[in-house]
Amino acid sequence: MAVYVVTIFLAAFLLFQIQPVIAKMILPRFGGTSAVWSACMLFFQAGLLLGYLYAHWLHRRLNARKQAIVHIALLAASLLVLPVAPGASWNGGGNPSLDILRLLAASVGLPYFMLSTTSPLLQSWYARARAGAVPYRLFALSNLASLVALLSYPVLVEPNLTTLAQGRAWSVAYACFALFCAAGAVMNALRREAKKEPAMAAGVEDEAAPGSKLRALWMALPACASILLLAITNYLTQDVAAIPFLWIVPLSVYLLSFIVCFEAPRLYVRAVFYPLLGAALAAMAYMLWTDREGIRVIAAVAISAGSLFVFSMVCHGELARLKPHPRHLTAYYLMLSAGGAAGGVFVGLIAPSVFNAYYEFPLGLALCAALAAWMLHAGYPRFFATRFGTACQLAMLAALSAYTVWLGISMRDSVAGCRVVARNFYGQLRVKDVDEDDGAGMRRKLLHGIINHGQQFLDAEYRGKPCTYYCAESGIGRAIAATDARNGRRFGVIGLGCGTLALYGRPGDVFRIYEINPLVPQLARNEFTYLRDTPARVELVMGDGRLSLEREPDQQFDFLIMDAFSGDSVPVHLLTREAFRTYLRHLKPDGILAVNISNKYLDLAPVIESDAAQFGKMALESRYEPDDDDVLCFGVSWMLVMDPATRAELGPALGAAERISARPGFRAWTDDFSDMFEILK
């Protein structure tokens, strides 16, 4: 039993520990967007499905001795790809989601596959070796190990180990797992050969095979939970707050429901959770319908996480009620993983290609309500056969129909009045005309979730004036104005938005703009006039700004302006020491590197200061808080990195920009290390 427990715990821990490790490793290659995590989740779910399929095949087709030979051979082969490290020369093919899947398959596919086979395979060995034994508690153990791995990463692993060290430590632990798993395979084979007896207790072979309806529920329930997990994660990271690693909260809640339902199934009581389900469905419908900007972030996260826990408890609680005799264990887990993978494919691949808004969220809610109604009806057939039961059944059907209609209306209203609604791998973009009753008239906004990525006034009085984060009083506005005496200035800009910065161009100036999202240039050209109105020459380079600059010869920029955001935060790979080395290579000696660090959750000033100090530069922070009657400007913070001589030359033109002092004990960010928790506001 000790071998089973240690192997399953270690496998599940490593299975979920590699997820944030490898995701962080590949994040810089795909723009640092939170969509990378969604694509990674799809890979992890597909890998789990393949692992369960393999376990089912091995369990059904081979005897214990052949199982041991095949499994040990694959374990040995998986050791050959260690240590885990994505190839530095990897080049994608243009579809980020498919590129991520291919990269993960090449770098960690076989070890991940072997880890995913462990729980169902060892449970089947345990059930065969001990007649009448119930192995489902081992499934709860594996989920507990997964939860420990997930929660320990941002708290213990990331702050203390570089990504290189993380990959090496994980690889060593995986080698230990392989030895334990191989030992378990040998022990199982020797025990079976020594006993020379049937694998199952008498009468088990006559156990009726699960019907198609039961198998469909084995798949539909986890698919629903998977859809809601990913949809709520997208909702939190893009529509509520793009706080790094916010996906840990919903995934932890999701795993916790597995642990409760399979370790302590008595805690799932329909009389308790069905009323809670009604409240959770209503709460999420309200969140979809109401103006999300009016909901406090903590409240939104708490409501979303609490609702997901209820949804997952109902789906997984009903799934646990339907678990079969251990003889059908591998088939059960196979359908369970197939459902999870189907949910991942729907949210990760199909929805971004088919929908222009996040319609998978209300569809997941409606599916959850329908499955709960079905399970309730199937669980009490005698009651629903009575007159009163029939009336309740009709009422339930009416409520389900009304709820589905309400969700449809809410999603329709979420995009109502938008000039453009578009969606791709990088998220949803909306263009909307809004009058905020401040006397400035209509303004056209570019929105990513609820984050304003730029706007333009339609009234002639304000139409040609820089606004939002780039107004004349902002740090970047003052810095550009201070260099007006220079002729033929070259601007590098990472992040296009709607193109506001181009308004600062003069004849002879050049704006070289780097943009990763192919939808953004289309909207900037078709819906806004900044790029058309500027007298400067505009050069647009598609691709991640840092990676593009690394490939280019020195550009000799007067300004390099970093204004790239994923939601409300700057992608980490754009803030590391190696990134700054690239930026400074492209600057003139008296050039200025400007970084927009405006956000609600992270204090990025120490990061910029440490990077600047590494190269003998000084870092100034320029903050601006507009008056109530200032319709052009937002509250904004810019970091300006330059030589001390340049600071002295520009003098008071930079306004109240203050030099940032080094934070004691702060560890500089590199491509191999970053710690978000150290800079939380």
Image (cartoon, rainbow, N blue to C red):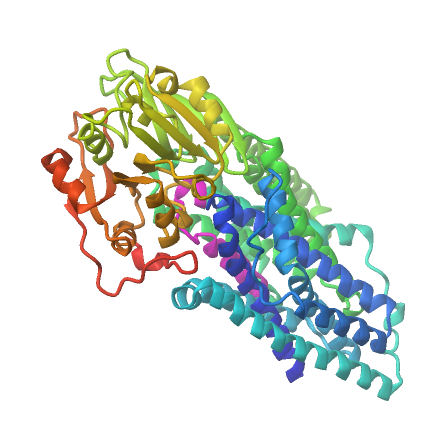
Q: Is residue 313 left or right of residue 591?
A: right
Of residues 394 and 673, the one nearer the viewer is 673
Q: Residue 540 location, x and y as percent? A: 44, 28
Q: Please state, as top left, top right, bottom left or bottom right, where the N terminus lies in the image.
A: bottom right
Q: Residue 412 location, x and y as percent? A: 51, 26
**Residue that extends furthest to the top in the rendered view of this protein:** 460
Can residue 369 be seen at all in this image of the molecule? no
Q: Is residue 320 magenta?
A: no
Of residues 460 and 578, the one nearer the viewer is 578
Q: Is residue 523 above or below residue 96?
A: above
Q: Is residue 251 magenta?
A: yes
Of residues 665 and 402, the one nearer the viewer is 665
Of residues 321 and 332, the one nearer the viewer is 332
Q: Is residue 278 above or below residue 70?
A: above
Q: Is residue 452 above or below residue 122?
A: above
The region drawn magenta spans: 237-260
Q: Is residue 636 above or below residue 471?
A: below
Q: Residue 621 location, x and y as percent? A: 20, 44
Residue at 47 percent of width and 42 percent of height: 551
